[in-house]
Image (cartoon, rainbow, N blue to C red):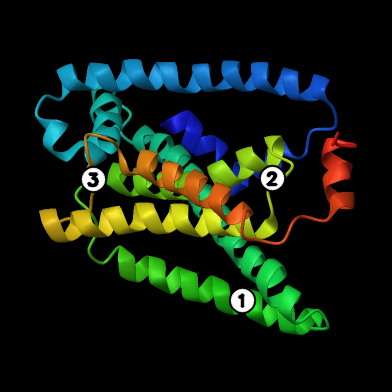
Amino acid sequence: FGPFAGSGQPSYMARQMAFKDTVTLRRSIVFMMIYFSLIYFPLIIIFTCSRVLLPGWEIDSDRIMPEMAMYLTSNAGAPWLAGLLLAAPFAAVMSSVDSFLLLFSSSITRDVYQQKYPDASEAKLKKVSFAVTIIMGVLAVVAVLKPPQFLQDLIVFGSGGLAASFLMPVVLMLYWPRLTPAASVAGMVSGGFTIGAIYLAGYFINGRFGEINLLGLHPFIWAVAVSALVSVIAVRFSKPTDPKLVENYFGQLKG
């Protein structure tokens, strides 16, 4: 579900909103297609080869990348090169982590706290931002004290959870003029709650962090379905969106 999960993540949406015209968007799509092909095709080949060069590491697959780097650089007579090779992916990981921390902090500060207290000073907003960042950092440290068996489980849960919360509300915002703010929030909350509840049930049933596939379907599918259903139902029981705002995005609607 990678392409769908990616399209539903807030950090990607902000970038998608930055293009100035459709020509730029089309060129970006082609550029990103080439860019990701150059990144991921070599990775597939490299780690397929690692199954032959380092057999048995399937049981601890999260360590295959550093082990592969050390194995190849040692055989090449330059073991120090392994540090440089490993610095690149870890730099990318750190970049993603701090981006999500800043995203969450700014969302809480600007979209929640400042909306409730519009007259708050910049000094107060800065303190709230620092507090949220520290709290989230501490929670992340506590969470990794007992990590899951595979890092991929966290990646799938994180990307799937973000997409489950935001994918359907964003799609409906783009193509359904009748969608309301309350329905959007209901879709976000229900989608995130659904995938979180399924993973929590999986933890108690299996005794470890991981999903359970109800009726053979990944939790992401169930969460998106619930998000869409709740959004549609909530439209009928919520206040309509301001017609002027709808007209700005969809033009004059007929009827």
Residue 56 lies, with reference to residue 44, above or below; the image says below
Q: Please, is residue 209 above or below residue 55 in the view?
A: below
Q: CA distance from mark 1 to mark 2?
A: 22 Å
| Residue 255 picture location, percent across and down | 84, 37
Q: Left or right: 212 with respect to 250?
A: left
Residues at badges 3 and 2 in contact (C-beta under 8 Å)? no
Q: Give the left or right position of residue 23, taking residue 212 as reference.
A: right
Q: x, y percentage for residue 188? A: 53, 55
Q: Which residue is mark 3?
A: 150
Residue drawn at x 48%, y 22% as measured from the top left: 39
Task: Name the residue furthest front.
Answer: 255
Q: What is the C-alpha distance between the residues marked 3 and 2?
A: 29 Å
Instruction: Report the residue marked by disc 2.
Output: 14
Q: Amino acid at mark 3?
A: Phe
Residue 79 showing in the rendered view: yes
Q: Is residue 24 left or right of residue 31?
A: right
Q: Which residue is mark 1?
A: 130
Q: Tell me which numbered mark, 3 or 2, is placed earlier along the sequence.
A: 2
Q: Are marks 1 and 3 in contact (CB under 8 Å)?
A: no
Dot 1 or dot 2, earlier in sequence: 2
Question: What amino acid is found at the position of numbered circle 1 in the picture?
Answer: Phe
Q: Foreground residue, 237 or 155?
A: 237
Q: Residue at x 30, y 27 (%)?
A: 73
The x and y percentages for residue 209 are 22, 54
Q: Is residue 90 visible?
A: no
> Neighbour class for label 3 at 10 Å: few (<14), some, many (≥20)?
some
